[in-house]
């Protein structure tokens, strides 16, 4: 794929630009739109314009005006990820890379460069590496993980619960997934602000993305060396000891993929679901009334606001056709999650309820479908549920239209989600999340209003006939009702 092959002017000369004053000024070579810079300020509108102009597959430009296709159609995305004979994830066959258009310091190089990981491999090598990852995933104690999620939620909420205000992005959504993933990988001591910042920086394709990637790899390679020497019951140790016999480099690279994919997608997912609950009265009412569970709210958010907008990339192994476009061998394609989820052919009414429908593209599909999606869902489901239990009166602390987003080709996430609530006392992190503690019982029982009443003038006691008291003394509590199936399910789900 070359810029001139997509020229909208009918000429093969990419240097021939539009005349002065033409609306096409600001476009890249060949009249193509850029997925970075000013063009990317409103990618949702850009995707719809591209859909109108080109159909379900459109030519665009990456950083440094590197050409690539973006797949906008839902069916076309599913076909691409499910056809390994036509499309692979091995960037070593990508024409712009072979032709030197993609420089070593390209900001997307951490995503572009081939690595010895299952998401870039094919055939038997893919099966070997994927088996190691899924095998290590299968050893995760999901009940134990939910307990960890609850404990970290308690710790994070304890930091701001007495203030009555918080930013649920920087103080909660950006920290909970990293804390839990560091625990799962076996490096709880590495969880800190720096690793959170490096993970967010890496996914954005900034000028410092390569340095952030180097920092994370150093942390993960040191973890690999420790667990190779002294294995424990964690994901890293099980990955090292899998019969696939991964090398240290393969282990470190897979740890990076698991950490970044789980962190970025889950941090965005938590923020998106909380925003939906706080700004849409329908969801808040349905959650409060029991008509919707938190997992159902998560699935709706995965349709409307997927945590990752695009995934780079897939590469054509031969000349083919996709969405009416001629795709040449060596062309690159973006898995268009966000535009595919709003394809009017599958969602003619975007306001329609999508609860129970898991055919969204949020976790990809085919041989390279995200293997850790259940962990991400568990962190979001359990963490949000625990937060709302601790802060049942939480409210948005600004107008909805004041919320700001940071957007890149890879993802779109909230900058801040300010909230207010009645100040709450901290809770013991070893206890399950609960509402504010119940006040201690009074020494004596009273029936009546809670307002203080004037003390009546004492009267002379008069003899009264003996009679049983109107209200029996609360000496023996009534046996508690047995929990129903729904309550037992909720206790299991929250890890109690």
Image (cartoon, rainbow, N blue to C red):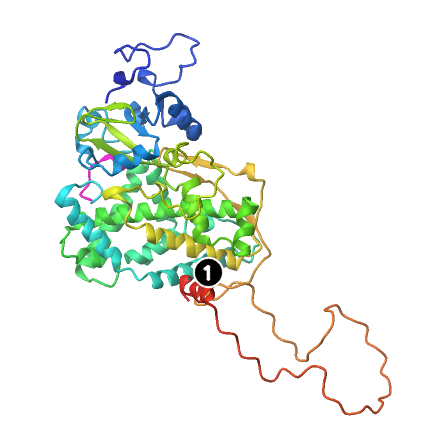
Residue at image point 76% right, 70% down? 452
Give the magenta part as a residue range. 110-117
Location of residue 213 (image quadrant)? top left
The image shows residue 411 at horizontal and vertical percentages of: 38, 37
Q: Locate the C terminus by quadrant.
A: bottom left
| Magenta segment main secondary structure | loop
Judged left or right of residue 253, residue 379 is: right
Q: Locate the N terminus by quadrant.
A: top left
Instruction: Give the labeled residue for mark 1.
Output: 154
Judged left or right of residue 177, residue 12 is: left
Query: Label 1 crowding class (10 Å Cα cut-off): few <14, some 14-19, many 20+?
Result: many
Location of residue 19 (image quadrant)? top left
Location of residue 264 (image quadrant)? top left
Judged left or right of residue 110, residue 160 is: right
User: Is residue 149 in sight in this rendering?
Assistant: yes
The image shows residue 446 at horizontal and vertical percentages of: 71, 76
The image shows residue 83 at horizontal and vertical percentages of: 22, 36
> Relative to the observer, which residue lies in front, 287 or 145?
287
Residue at image point 56% right, 67% down? 437
Q: Of helix, strand and loop, which one carries label 1?
A: helix
- Is-magenta flag for residue 329? no
Residue at image point 21% right, 59% down? 238
The image shows residue 282 at horizontal and vertical percentages of: 55, 47
**Above or below for 65 versus 78:** above
């Amino acid at each position: 794929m070359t810029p001139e092959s997509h020229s909208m002017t009918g000429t093969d000369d990419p240097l021939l630009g539009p005349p002065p004053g033409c609306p096409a000024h600001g476009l890249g070579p060949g009249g193509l739109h850029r997925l970075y810079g000013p063009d990317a300020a409103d990618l949702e509108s850009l995707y719809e314009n591209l859909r109108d102009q080109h159909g379900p597959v459109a030519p665009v430009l990456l950083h440094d005006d590197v050409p690539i296709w973006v797949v906008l159609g839902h069916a076309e995305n599913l076909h691409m990820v499910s056809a390994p004979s036509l499309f692979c994830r091995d960037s070593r066959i990508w024409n712009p890379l072979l032709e030197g258009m993609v420089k070593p310091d390209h900001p997307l190089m951490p995503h572009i460069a081939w690595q010895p990981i299952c998401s870039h491999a094919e055939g038997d090598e893919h099966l070997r590496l994927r088996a190691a990852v899924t095998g290590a995933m299968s050893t995760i104690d999901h009940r134990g993980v939910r307990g960890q999620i609850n404990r970290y939620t308690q710790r994070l909420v304890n930091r701001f619960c007495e203030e009555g205000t918080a930013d649920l992005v920087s103080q909660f959504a950006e920290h909970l997934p990293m804390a839990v993933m560091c625990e799962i990988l076996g490096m709880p001591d590495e969880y800190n602000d720096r690793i959170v910042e490096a993970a967010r920086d890496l996914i954005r394709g900034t000028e410092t993305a390569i340095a952030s990637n180097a920092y994370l790899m150093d942390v993960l390679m040191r973890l690999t060396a420790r667990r190779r020497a002294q294995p424990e019951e964690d994901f890293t140790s099980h990955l090292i000891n899998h019969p696939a016999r991964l090398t240290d480099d393969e282990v470190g690279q897979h740890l990076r993929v698991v950490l970044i994919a789980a962190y970025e997608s889950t941090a965005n997912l938590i923020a998106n679901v909380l925003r939906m609950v706080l700004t849409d009265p329908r969801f808040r009412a349905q959650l409060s009334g029991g008509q919707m569970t938190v997992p159902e709210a998560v699935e709706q958010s995965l349709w409307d606001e997927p945590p990752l907008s695009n995934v780079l990339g897939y590469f054509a192994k031969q000349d083919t056709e996709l969405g009416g476009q001629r795709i040449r061998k060596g062309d690159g394609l973006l898995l268009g999650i966000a535009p595919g989820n709003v394809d009017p052919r599958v969602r003619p009414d975007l306001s329609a309820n999508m609860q129970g429908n898991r055919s969204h593209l949020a976790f990809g599909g085919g041989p390279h479908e995200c293997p850790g999606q259940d962990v991400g869902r568990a962190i979001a489901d359990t963490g949000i549920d625990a937060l709302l239990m601790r802060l049942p009166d939480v409210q948005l602390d600004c107008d909805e239209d004041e919320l700001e987003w940071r957007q890149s080709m890879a993802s779109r996430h909230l900058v801040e989600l300010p909230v207010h609530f009645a100040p709450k006392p901290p809770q013991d992190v070893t206890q399950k999340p609960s509402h504010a503690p119940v006040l201690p019982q009074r020494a004596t029982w009273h029936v009546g209003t809670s307002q203080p009443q004037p003390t009546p003038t004492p009267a002379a006691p008069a003899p009264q006939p003996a009679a049983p008291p109107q209200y029996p003394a609360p000496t023996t509590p009534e046996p508690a009702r047995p929990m129903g199936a729904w309550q037992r399910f909720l206790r299991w789900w929250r890890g109690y």
